[in-house]
Image: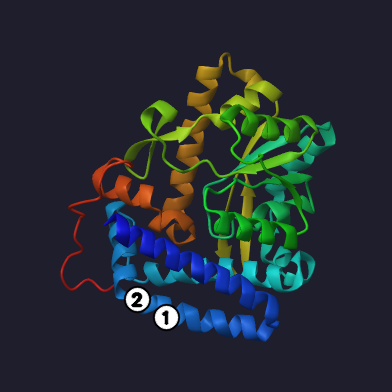
Amino acid sequence: MALSRRLRKDAVMRLLEGGAALAQRCNRRQVNLILSVALRVVKACLPLRIRLARNMKAAELYRRGLVDLHFDRAADQMRMLMHVLRAGFQASGACDRFQFDESFRHLDAIRASGRGALIISPHLCGYPLFPRVLADRFPCSIYLRRSPDPRKHKINMMVGAAGDGHLVYPPPDSARSERLFVALRVLREGRGLYLTPDLPRKPHEGTPVHVLGQRTYFPAGVAIMAMRTRVPIVMVDWHWSDGAYRVRCHEPLDPATLRSRSEAAGSIMRLFAARMDEAVRSHPEMWWNWLDKRWTRLLRTGSAHADPTGPRAIPRGTRV
């Protein structure tokens, strides 16, 4: 099983490297054609469809056609990224695909006050582009996690540089305190910092929350950063409608109203989990993490760190 996972991971990395190289050599029409063919191939991959449908069913969100809708949105994320690599962010057209409604007034008010903000969302399709899109309206830094896989880190850096955004990342082999310092510095400069804190952690590494019918643990780093810098937290989500991603900014949460760090961690992450649950249930096709290995284990077994054996079966005859 370990060998199989390594082979799959190596295959994915080769595809990403090949896609990045192709994007830099192709024009817009060629990129769209390549992705159109790739999408048809992915949609025809029965094992992938079954795995995705099982996870959606475990969350009690599965319905006919949802698998294809998710593949469409995931492919659109890859399309935007390839066009950024091909032509740079401004010429890619990615910015025009995100539309903000009147709720953006919350970020306008924070900017007028001269403060930074922690901007958080689940991993929704389009999330790698969102902080760069936001940066044209609200000064926002892109925090690049340093992947342990040097090939993946190289691709992340390539996309970040092509996006021409304000990139921050920890030094190699940095301790948790050093990584935290990098983030705190951005917030103290009055900038926004975008994070996606919806990956399950081990019990001793996170705060307990309930989401998608499961008890899990989300990282408390968001609360720690907010308490130390006294910046507001703005939760955002978006969905695809009428040819654009419609972005909603929730009312800011002021950490000054919370009495202690432990209270802050619990209150903030429970509220984030509740809003994530609402967003994913409303538009399940948008959630990028349906195939994440930790979420697969959590949805099927109730533990993100257990072996995902005995998955719930899809009734015979169900189309995926």
Residue 298 numbered tag = none
Q: Which element is circle 2 on?
A: loop
In the rendering, at what x and y percent does residue 315 appear?
A: 17, 65
Instruction: Kindly identify which residue carries mark 2.
Output: 45
Q: Which element is circle 1 on?
A: helix
Binning the other alpha carbons within 10 Å of mark 2 as few (below 14), some (14 to 19) or many (20 upward) gives few
Place residue 42 in its image quadrant.
Answer: bottom left
Location of the N terminus (image quadrant): bottom left
In the rendering, at what x and y percent does residue 18 appear?
A: 56, 74
Q: Is residue 128 above or below residue 212?
A: below
Instruction: Please tell me which residue is depicted at 42% across the width and 52% down the height of the picture.
Output: 281
Q: CA distance from mark 2 to mark 1?
A: 7 Å
Instruction: Please tell me which residue is depicted at 70% across the width and 28% down the height of the picture.
Output: 231
Instruction: Kindly identify which residue carries mark 1.
Output: 41
Amino acid type shown at disc 1? Val
In the rendering, at what x and y percent does residue 143 appear?
A: 66, 44
Instruction: Please tell me which residue is depicted at 63% across the width and 74% down the height of the picture.
Output: 21
Q: Are marks 2 and 1 in contact (CB under 8 Å)?
A: yes
* Left or right of residue 281: residue 236: right
Instruction: Please tell me which residue is depicted at 29% across the width and 40% down the height of the picture.
Output: 303
- Of 103 and 111, nearer the camera is 111
* Left or right of residue 318: residue 122: right
Amino acid type shown at disc 2? Cys
